[in-house]
Amino acid sequence: MATTGKSAESGTAAADAAGTGAEPRPQDAPVSAAGQDRIRELEAKAAECEDRWRRAMADADNTRKRHVAELRAERAAERARVAAAFLPVIDNLELALAHAEADPTAVVQGVLAIRDQAVQLLTGLGYERDDESGVPFDPARHEVVAVVDEPGTEPNTVTRVVRPGYGTGGGQLRPTAVTVAQPRR
């Protein structure tokens, strides 16, 4: 009879579950003391992992903010270094202007010296002056402002530099503005 009672109880629980449409869930089952300890241990580990994750995210955010601030400071320092390098050029221009009423030849020579000083400064920064004519046209270095008919000149040859360029390749401040010999027809 005991067997029948258990079957009846099992059948009743199954019928109750079937009647409500709900199945018995694992979290409804009783958990042993060892199981409870394991659950607490895993919950503690999960909380520790979440805490470590939050700290790592905060550290990453702080590192990003610090990097942005350092980059901003370095850019400002570099701008200041370049601007400071141009101060002697400005000083020399002011000296030339102060003596403008004097000998015009001396003023012209002074202005040429100042231009050379500025070109040297750009060269020191890695932007060499490009003002060469008689070379083949190179679209990476040159900007055509006019095509001219130059008898005796190879087609696509730079015939005149209108405005010098500075720099080369990807480090170019501006291309050299040139006139180019017309292709033969």
Image: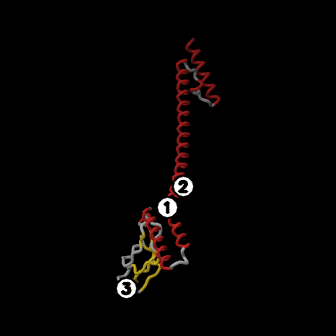
Which one is nearer the viewer's eye here, 32 or 17?
32
Q: Residues within 10 Å of mark 1 (few under 14, many from 20)?
A: some
Amino acid on which the number 2 mark rests in the picture: Ala
In the rendered image, which quarter contains the C terminus? bottom left
- Say if residue 74 shows up in the picture: yes
Amino acid on which the number 1 mark rests in the picture: Ala
Q: Residue at 36% across / 76% down in the picture?
A: 136
The kind of secondary structure element at disc 3 is: loop
Residue wearing tag 3: 184
Q: Earlier in the sequence, mark 2 or mark 1?
A: 2
Q: Nearer the viewer, mark 2 or mark 1?
A: 1
Decide if residue 169 is on the left or right side of residue 15: left
- Residue closest to the far bottom: 151
Q: Residues within 10 Å of mark 2 (few under 14, many from 20)?
A: few
In space, the residues marked 2 and 1 are separated at their CA atoms by: 14 Å
- Residue 76: image tag: 2
The kind of secondary structure element at disc 2 is: helix
- The percent coordinates of residue 135 (x first, y second) are 36, 76
Q: Earlier in the sequence, mark 2 or mark 3?
A: 2
The kind of secondary structure element at disc 1 is: helix
- The percent coordinates of residue 127 (x first, y second) are 43, 65
Decide if residue 60 is on the left or right side of residue 151: right
- Residue 85: image tag: 1
Q: Earlier in the sequence, mark 3 or mark 1?
A: 1
Q: Residue at 54% across / 74% down in the picture?
A: 99
In the rendered image, which quarter contains the N terminus? top right
Which one is nearer the viewer's eye here, 153 or 28?
153
Amino acid on which the number 3 mark rests in the picture: Arg
